[in-house]
Each structure stands twice: as C-alpha cells, then as structure tokens.
Image (spheres, grey):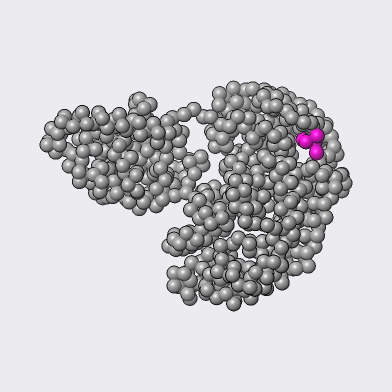
Amino acid sequence: MSSTSRAVFLSYASQDAEAARRICETLCAAGVDVFLDQSELRGGDAWDQRIRREIHDCALFIPIVSQHTHERLEGYFRHEWKLAIERTHHMAEQKPFLVPVVVDGTGDQEAYVPDAFRAVQWTRLPGGNTPTAFVDRIKRLLSSELSPFAAASGARAELRQPVRGSWRSKLVLLAIGAVMFAAMTVIVVDRLWISKHQTAPAAFAPPPHSIAVLPFVNMSGDKEQEYFSDGLAEELLNSLAEISELQVAARTSAFSFKGTNADIGIIARKLNVGAVLEGSVRRSGNTVRITTQLINAVTGFHLWSHTYDRDLGDVLKLQTEIATAVASTLKVTLLGDIAAKVELGGTRNPAAFDAYLRAVKAFSLRHDAKEIPTALGAYSEAVRLDPHYALAFAGRSIAHSVAVGDAATTAEAREGSDNALADARQALALAPDLAQAHLALAVVSESTFNFTQASAAYERALALAPGNAQVLRLSGYFAAQMGHFDAGVAAARRGVALDPLGRQSRSELGRALYFARRYEEAITVFAEAISLEPDFKSTYGERGLAYYGLGDLQRARASCETKADEWGIQQCLAVVYYKLGRHADAEAEFAKMKAALGDDFAYQYASIFAQWGKPAQALEWLETALRLRDPGLEYLKTDPLLDPLRQEARFQAIERELKFPD
C-alpha cells in the first residue's frame, strides 16, 4: 500500500457531505484512517491522479448511496465508483473491499448503482449516524486483510486536507511482526463472522414462475394507436395474473421501462422476475398482427416466440392462447379452465374493446380530476356498444368513485357515488366472479361509509385475484384502517413485491404501517416512495407525520418543509410547529388550509385541534365532518392523530354512528 493512502476511502455526492463527515469522524475517533475529500471543486489531472492512487491503495471503499446519488446520473462520485469496481477485477472474490452505506431511505433494488454494489451487504446509517457495531465491522474487515490500520490508535482524517495517520510510525511497523500470530487468529474469527453477516456475491435468483409483460411496440405507423398496443399488453398481463401459480409484475412497474431501451437483464433484476414477455402490434382496421417472445431473464435465451394474425373479435381467445403458451413454457401447472378466467367479463365486440382500451389509457394517464371525464366517456361508449361488458362497467365504477373526491358540490358527489354503485352492481350481475367488479364495489362502499360491505368486497376480490397488485395494495390499506394491522401490512407488502417501482404501492404500505404505529418502518417506506416520485408532495407530509409519531420533531419539520402548498403538508406543519412551541406558525398553517378548503376538510381540522390539546374544538369539527359526510372519516378508527379523543363520549358516539366492522 502506498505510504500516502488511507485505510478507508469514503465516496459521496456533494449533497451528502454532512453524512459523510459524521461517518468519517466516528471512524477516525475509533482509530481508523479515512480519506475524505471535501473539496468544493474536484478535477484537474493532479487531483484525478490523487483520487486514482487513493482508491487503488485503500483497504476498503465505502460508497455512500442516497436519494442524491439516485437523482444524479452524472457526478465525480460515479467516476470513483467505477475506479473501485475496476480494482475488484484484480481481487479474489473472497476479499472484502466494497462496503456500500445508505444514509436515507433509498431502497437497494431501486438505487442507480453498479451491480457490484448489490452483490455485497449494505449498511443503513440514517443521516450518517454511525453506531459502534458498524465501526467494529470496519475494524474486523481491515484486520482480516492484515492491514496495519487495525493497530492504529489516534489515526484521523482532517476534513479539509487529508493528513498522515500515526500508523506510519516506524515503531508501529516494527511491532507488526510481533502481532502476526494474533492477526492470523483474527482472520479466522473474522472469516467466520463474514460468512454469517456479509452477503456473498450471488447469482440472480428471482422467484420461480415470475414474469413481467413489457408494453408492446406500436408498429402501426400511427402514434395515435399507442393506446392500443399498450392496452393489449396490459390485458395480456391481466390474463397471466389470473393464473394462480404465476407471479406477474404490476403494470406500473413493468410499463415504467417504456421508451428506455433498457437491457432485459436490468429490467428483470429491478422487477425481480425470471422471465420477460415482449412483443409488437401492427393494426389495420379490425385486423391485428401480434408478435410475442418470451425471454429467460437469467440466461438471456429466448424460450418461445410466435406471431398471430387475428380479427379484433378474437382478441379474448388470443389472450387465452398466449397465456396458456407462456404458462406451459414456464412449466406452470394449469389448474381449472384458464379460458374461463381470462375471458371473464370481456367482449368480442371490436369497437367496444377499442373504446375500453382508450378508457383505460385515459384513466391511467390522468393528472387530475379534470381529465376523468375523458375516461368516463370512453367507458360509456364501451358499455353502449356491448351492454354485457362487465370489465367496462367495473372500470367506469372506479372512475366515478375517484371523481367523487373532487366533486364541486354535495349533490354532484352523491350522484357520482350512486353511479359508481350502480356500475359495480351491474358488473357483478354480469360476472359474479370478476375480481375487478368486487374491487369496484369495495371502493364505492368504502367512500360511502358502508365499511362492512367494503370489507366483504375486498375480501372477495383478494380471494379471486391474489396476484393483483392493485387489489393487494387497496385491500391492505383498508384492512389497516379497520385495525387489522398484520393482515393489512402483509397484503400491502405483497403488493409492493409485485409492483417494486410503483410509488402508489409503497405509499399504501407506508400508510398501513403508519396506522399500525410502526413509524420507523413507515418512514423507510415513505422515503422509498419519494425516491420513486420525488415531486409527489403529499408523501413528504406523510413521512413527516410518521416522524412526528416517533417523536422526532426536527426531522418531521424538515420533511414537511421540503414541499409547500399542499394540504397534507400544511396539516403536518400545523401539528409539528405547535409541538415545537411555534404556535403562531402552526395557526398560520391552519389558516391557509381553512382559507383554501373551507369546511370540506373538517376531519383534518379535527385532527389538528386534537393534537393541539383542544378536544372541544376537535370534536366540533368531527361532528361537522359527520354531517358533511367528509371522506376523511374512514380513517377515524385507527388514525394516530385522534388518539387524544378516544375516551371522549362524543367521539365514541361518532365512532358508533360510522358502524366500523370488528
């Protein structure tokens, strides 16, 4: 090792300098020599050579992973990562070198890091706070390489300019020979520790019978036909999900790779699937040519491919044919009548099918409630063309339910709920075993406070479609709201497993954990949701309330102050500021909410006053919420913010009025 190098090289993005400094200081205090560059400007041949030398000669390389590194696709730290990985090519596989550290809630499956980082154990040090266990591990890893750094006492790193450590003393060098025998003993013990605690590099091993369906390529020459190629792929994805032994990645995650030209192997690893189905669609009038190929994501070999020429009226039969072929190729045992499951609730009317695909596309791409009428119009066209199209009725029901949340008047909301309920019942009448119909009934029942009916409908949807990520996340969240925490969290976790790149699935899991008072876990999950969709404001408020539940008021404040002008953020700041003694600021946040939202958010106002220690005003707002049928009341049974009110007689009367199921 060069006489100017350090035992440990800390690599970080500039935004993580504070976390890096904390890790460095803790290691140095324990006698570990650390190289930490805090130059404001990196670059130049001389400095580049210095970095190369330090990485080439260090004993351990610690890359700091965070939301900042995830967002920065370019940066000098990535150059450092590349140099470190290049060095591992000259090392034995058993030699410890890479020690990735995560300083926030970034998930290891989503982070944009080299594959070599995933092959070893990751350590989570939130904010750079470094426990003794991590320091001990670093020392063991250093001693296992017979590094003289392990004997250092008082070695340190200056944060502005690296300095020599005391290990270079000639006396220490002479002493090394005397401790060789002891060091060899340490090696044996440390190897045993590593074998138990450090994940060895392992081959990609996804769950058996797992598959992702990528969006099909539109070969029609008309960009306006994109809804059709995407829709066919999604319908096929839903068909495969009906086969109970298949684990199918959710649409949100699988379709996130559209237009990226990502390698199949990378996609498979991010989605944790063993096979990938891709294809193309060429449409001419009511005739369609679909070319599909199934790829083994572990080996990269093609397993099966086929081209189909069909009339649109035969699409249902085609879905069954492809699903059966894929299942057979993956050696899945087919139980029951696959055609009956795949084709349930569908249509053989080409025009109705086309309208349905347009509706699905419009609803999935909506940005706000103003765009829902487009989807409702296309769903209505589909059911007009085929009055027996159960899937279209179920889809329109859910669209109506979502639109109710942004209704301008009480009368408009009531009409929307009535329409949603009528469509859900019609879908069930046409196809009693259609999971999507039961899900539609559950959603509208929940929004109209018929919680007993919602519970039964969610349970039935889950029984019919245990591999549907949407059913899992919604039913899991509802179960947690109703106080069934273990079942709710378990279902929501399965939803995340099927939808690893979906922000919404993680948000629902985070909320389920929050209602279960599992705040630390909720914080981690909300951070993962933020990493997937950093601009989605409300998640910062939800994470802030989880910190608040944990009693970490400063992190709660920081999370909620990250984004502004959103009611969830204002609610969070109102309770956090008040607890911090900033009563004027808290009241200002409440005033902003009240001015913008009027009485429509009476439930949220009640939660604020409950946390302010003003039960009388809180109960008045809850009674207003009940009178206005405020949708927020569905949280009342388990909402942590209302805990101060639970022994109040007026609160208990409201709870009885809502008739929550046991």
| Residue located 38% across and 41% down the image | 63
Question: Height in image: 392 above or below 2?
Answer: below
Q: Is residue 342 magenta?
A: yes
| Residue located 34% across and 44% down the image | 133
Asked if residue 477 can be seen in this view, the reply is no
Q: Which residues are magenta?
A: 340-344
Q: Is residue 518 left or right of residue 28?
A: right
Report x, y in % for residue 411.
Answer: 78, 67
* Residue nearest the observer in this picture, 566 or 343: 343
Q: Quadrant of the C terminus?
A: bottom right
| Residue located 67% across and 32% down the image | 245
Q: Quadrant of the N terminus?
A: top left
* Residue nearest the observer in this picture, 551 or 281: 551
Report x, y in % for residue 379.
Answer: 79, 49
Asked if residue 407 can be seen in this view, the reply is yes
Report x, y in % for residue 618.
Answer: 60, 73
| Residue located 43% across and 30% down the image | 201
* Number of marks present in the image shown: 0
* Residue nearest the observer in this picture, 606 or 652: 652
Quarter location, residue 91: top left
Q: Residue furthest bottom?
A: 616
Q: Is residue 608 magenta?
A: no
In terms of secondary structure, what is the magenta stretch mainly?
helix
* Residue nearest the observer in this picture, 74 or 346: 346
Question: Height in image: 438 above or below 188?
Answer: below
Q: Is residue 70 left or right of residue 13?
A: right
Report x, y in % for residue 140.
Answer: 30, 37
